[in-house]
Image (spheres, rainbow, N blue to C red):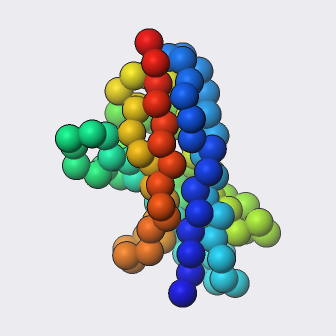
Amino acid sequence: QVQLVESGGGLVQAGGSLRLSCAASGSLFSNYAMDWWRQAPGKQRELVAQITPSRNTIYADSLKGRFTISRDNAKRTVYLQMNSLKSEDTAAYYCRISTTNVWGQGTQVTVSE
């Protein structure tokens, strides 16, 4: 069973940056498309970004230009670089193996004004 462990969340001021990491166990990481999702209090979980094995990416329209997803297959890690953070980016952020029910435990991002 593949396990995903997120890290890198925290408290940041509006306009700041954070980089989230999601480390995967197992040897097939390079074969997986990987997602970042987020869930704010009282809201549904939403897809933030996805990266395919060939490094094609998609983003939520509202986040294009501020967030960047990337991967390092040698480290079995997917990253989410978040810039120009806003208070509305406050949420728990989760990584997932695309189209599966394999999720990490989440990491909290809080953006203060």
Query: How many labels were placed on the picture?
Result: 0
Q: Position of residue 58 (x, y in %)?
A: 45, 51
Q: Is residue 13 left or right of 79 when viewed as pictured?
A: left
Q: Nearer the viewer, residue 25 or 83?
A: 25
Q: Position of residue 47 (x, y in %)?
A: 36, 52
Q: Which residue appears farthest toward the right when viewing the image?
A: 74
The structure residue drawn at horizontal position 40% and vertical position 31%, both measured from the top left corner, is 89
Judged left or right of residue 85, residue 91 is left
The front one of 24 and 78 is 24
Among the 4 quarters of the image, the one containing residue 100: bottom left
Say left or right for 72 vs 92. right
Residue 11 located left or right of residue 44: right
Looking at the rendered image, the quarter that the C terminus falls into is top left
* Residue at (79% x, 69% y) in the render: 74
Q: Quadrant of residue 41?
A: top left
The extreme bottom residue here reads 1
Q: Residue 38, how many percent across, how many down?
A: 38, 47
Please say whether residue 21 is visible from this viewpoint.
Answer: yes
Q: Does residue 84 appear anywhere in the picture?
A: no
Q: Position of residue 26 (x, y in %)?
A: 66, 82
Residue found farthest to the top: 113
Give me the residue at 49% from left, 64% from top.
104
Residue 61 versus residue 15 in the image, above or below: below
Can you say which quadrant of the picture contains the N terminus?
A: bottom right
Task: Give 33 or 9, whichever is nearer the viewer.
Answer: 9
